[in-house]
Image: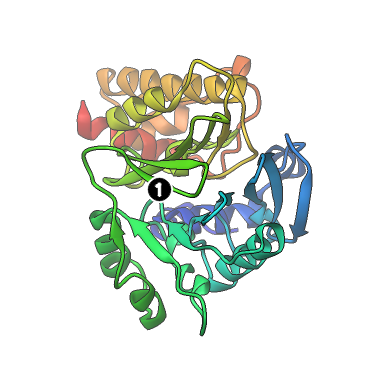
Amino acid sequence: MPTRRQFVRQSTSCAAHIALAAAVSPAWMRALWANAPLGPIVAREPFGSLERVAENAWALVSTPLSGDRTTLSNGGIIAGRSAVLAIEGFNQPAGATWLATRARELTGRWPTHVVVTHYHSDHSNGVAGYVNATDHPSVRATAATRTMVLEKNAADADRAAALRDVVVIAPDAPSTLDLGGRTARFVPRAGHTASDVSIELDDPSLVFCGDLVWNAMVPNYVDAVPTQLAKSVTAIRRRQPTTYVPGHGAVAREADFDRYVAMLGEIEQGARAAKAAGKTPAEGGAAFKLSAALGEWALFNPSFFERAFGAWYKEL
């Protein structure tokens, strides 16, 4: 097991956050990650399961605590009569290729479009896996996400080529993609990083949240601006029954989403109290515990609370 100093130094990305979890997670934590699916499973691999969440819509729920790093993040497929949208680039090209192959099996088409929700490597580094000799999907991301992928993630020529002609998602207003009888909406947001995007359908009510939402897991605050995160999460929550695909963890419904909101609120209260008491983020985070009423939450190392408190201290 890594020392605390090694853990803090190495776990600056969500990919590292999850990879280190695989080495230390107990059985109950693994069960939280892979709750019973809400819909039928149409494909399963060691790295995750493809779950039908609506008509012609599927969520890939990654289960990387096995140690398989092919995907690491959740993603999915939304199909219409004339186009197929793949969501996320995943950690490795093999993950994107696998999802694209399932899309062709399920819909008759390789993805025509791909969207990347934010720059973190577990969501973006494998995007070149969608491109082959005959298939060149149109990739969509914000300009900020494209820039950060190329500047902050490990250099890779194939990834750079796949992102060369990105269709830029406007940073200040929702945009839409007509899939043929179904419209996907890309909503620019912020909070987990400086440039996040949610992918939303109205009928059925379905939201792919990216890493703005994690289910039964304490999120990574490495790039977070907590007040913006809270604002974005509040905006994503819908009044009508909705299926939420988080960036990590099992597919969620309203009760799961509201428990996540309550967890974020408890972290905020804890950070504010610790700062008022003159504690450092390390001291406050080490002493902090979520209330038993929230149930079990995957927390892979106490330094995650320290990181969350540090993010809050920057704003307070």
**Residue 290 placement (x, y as % from top left):** 53, 23
Locate the C terminus by quadrant. top left
Quadrant of the snapshot with the N terminus: bottom right
Residue 253 sits above or below residue 40 on the image = above
Q: Is residue 246 above or below residue 167?
A: above
In the image: residue 274, left or right of residue 72: left
Label 1, secondary structure: give it: strand
Residues 116 and 240: in front is: 240
**Closest to the observer: 31 or 283?**
31
Residue beneath the point at 42% across and 25% down: 267
Q: Give amino acid for label 1.
A: Leu
Q: Is residue 314 left or right of residue 82?
A: left
Q: Is residue 221 left or right of residue 103?
A: left
The residue depicted at 44 percent of the width and 35 percent of the height is 305
Q: Position of residue 211 (x, y in %)?
A: 45, 43
Residue at (68, 60) in percent of width and height = 47
Pick whichever, 263 or 87, lies toward us: 87
Residue 8, position as x, y percentages in the image? 41, 53
Name above or below for residue 166 compared with residue 61. Answer: below
Q: How many marks?
A: 1
Which quadrant would residue 196 be assigned to in this image? top left
Q: Give the residue at x 62% y 17%.
A: 292
Q: Is residue 280 visible?
A: no
The residue carrying pointer 1 sits among few (fewer than 14), some (14 to 19) or many (20 or more) residues within 10 Å by Cα, namely few
Disc 1 marks which residue?
Answer: 177
Estimate the x, y position of residue 89 in percent, counting from the top left: 48, 62
**Residue 81, can we see it?**
yes
User: In this view of the protein, which residue sits in the foreground, 16 or 160?
Assistant: 160
